[in-house]
Image: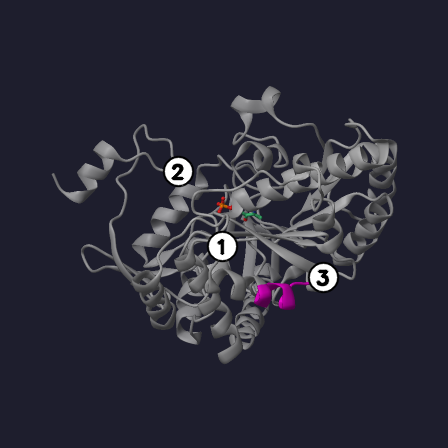
Amino acid sequence: MNLRERDSKFVWHPFTQQKNMIESIVISSAKGSYLYDENGNAYLDAISSWWVNIHGHSHPYIAQKIHEQASQLEHIIFAGFTHEPAVTLAERLVNILPGNFSKTFYSDDGSTSTEVAIKMAIQYWWNVQSTVGGQQSTGRKRLLAFKNSYHGDTFGSMSVSDRSVFTLAFHELLLDVIFIDTPNESNFESIKREISKHGNEIAAFIYEPLIQGAGGMKMYDPVLMDELLLFIKQKNIVCIADEVMTGFGRTGKLFASEYLQTKPDIICLSKGLTGGTMALGVTACTENIYNAFVNDDGKKTFFHGHSFTANPIACSAANANLDLFEQNNVMQNVQFISDRNIAFAQQLRQLNGIKNVRCLGSILAFEIEQGEDVYLNSVSAVLTKKGLDKGVYIRPLGNTVYIMPPYCITNEELDIIYSVLLDLI
Ligand SMILES: *Cc1c(COP(=O)(O)O)cnc(C)c1O
């Protein structure tokens, strides 16, 4: 059996209906913006391999740091022990994160980073209220989230994600979440009324700042979002920014929360955190949140952790990622992609058959006017296949086509991506 056949026989792929599945493409290597398959075909990775890769594939500097760390200390239990890569990373993150963050909690990926944030926020209220009342309180347990959001696939993170085909089988098992629309001029007052109705039952509000990724690259107004955040903060609701996708330059600033005046109490990071090389999640919080857990009462401990919490190799990769931001003009590359995307968007807006052309930082998105605006729209698979045949890897979300390239992408490589997109339309 060749590799493709062994894959079909033994492997179950994510987000993939295995029945009548098209055989997976075997990727043998990747370098910069390119993926190479077993037959030597090259594909431009226009979506940074599910939004994680930011400096290009197989980056020599990150690879070297991973190698060095793996040869020195590959892993160690993180309770009762610590290590330099984790401490250094925590310190560096606290210094650059958008807000008054003081502590960094490690986990494994984006879903666990939001799962941890949700548990932290709920237990924060449990800890605080049991102090005040002298007994266990049933106070704030509900959560607030945006419709159309995506925060991950574990139970807590799935609960605060939009109810969709992703969550269908689990609906009656999910946490109690109030969903609101992203703010616009016409719904703003009714959103505020909805929140006011439940104000002191809500433990936390979780949001993807400025752009909802898996929900279809939907962008919303930062000015109204700022007003909304301020309103929510006044109700003492813990604000959780899910920057798993937007973090590390994606939107044109190091973090999307930098576009907003009101800063979160908790922030979630993954994807670009290690330059897209290793699985690692971070949930950072303010001193106020953290202090609610520091207590003589052992029951107020945060009882959460993973076998691989703060894996030294992953932390080293993340430190190498931050080195690259410090040493190279990474944000200038993002600006360059952003400028080119904006110019290309103007061109796209002249065309028939597509709508809602929009840009933010290195992200460009639009909808194909064919079928419904839903994830299961079959146009996605068709476009992915056609793109691959032309040497460009895109993976539309239903009929929403987007690009989100690694920041190392060149002028010529962008030309290729744009011309393939025009062909596909
Ligand atoms: C991808 C993503 C997640 C989930 O991260 P995983 O590493 O895939 O578990 C959570 N939130 C946002 C905004 C994401 O884009």
Colour basis: one colour
Marks 3 and 2, the one that precedes in the sequence: 2
Q: Report x, y in % for residue 408.
A: 43, 71
Inspect the image, locate mark 2, and give the three-letter code of the amino acid beneath it. Pro
230 is higher (above) or lower (below) than 120: below
Question: Which class describes the residues within 10 Å of circle 2: few (<14), some (14-19), or many (20+)?
Answer: few
Q: Report x, y in % for residue 300.
A: 68, 38
Inspect the image, locate mark 3, and give the three-letter code of the amino acid beneath it. Gly
Q: Dot 3: what SS?
A: loop
Q: Which residue matches tag 2?
A: 14
Q: Tell whether circle 1 marks a residue whose Cβ is less than 8 angstroms from ligand 1.
A: yes
Q: Report x, y in % for residue 312.
A: 42, 58
Inspect the image, locate mark 1, and give the three-letter code of the amino acid beneath it. Lys
**Is residue 369 in sight in this rendering?**
no
Question: Which class describes the residues within 10 Å of circle 1: few (<14), some (14-19), or many (20+)?
Answer: many
Residue occupying the point 13% across, 42% down:
2
Residue occupying the point 48% across, 73% down:
323
Residue at the front extreme? 296
* Residue 95 on the magenta segment: yes
Question: In terms of depth relative to the viewer, which is nearer, 296 or 55?
Answer: 296
Segment colored magenta? 91-100
Residue at the top extreme? 172
2 is higher (above) or lower (below) than 29: above
What is the C-alpha distance between the residues marked 3 and 1?
Answer: 20 Å
Q: Which residue matches tag 1?
A: 271
Q: Which residue matches tag 3?
A: 99
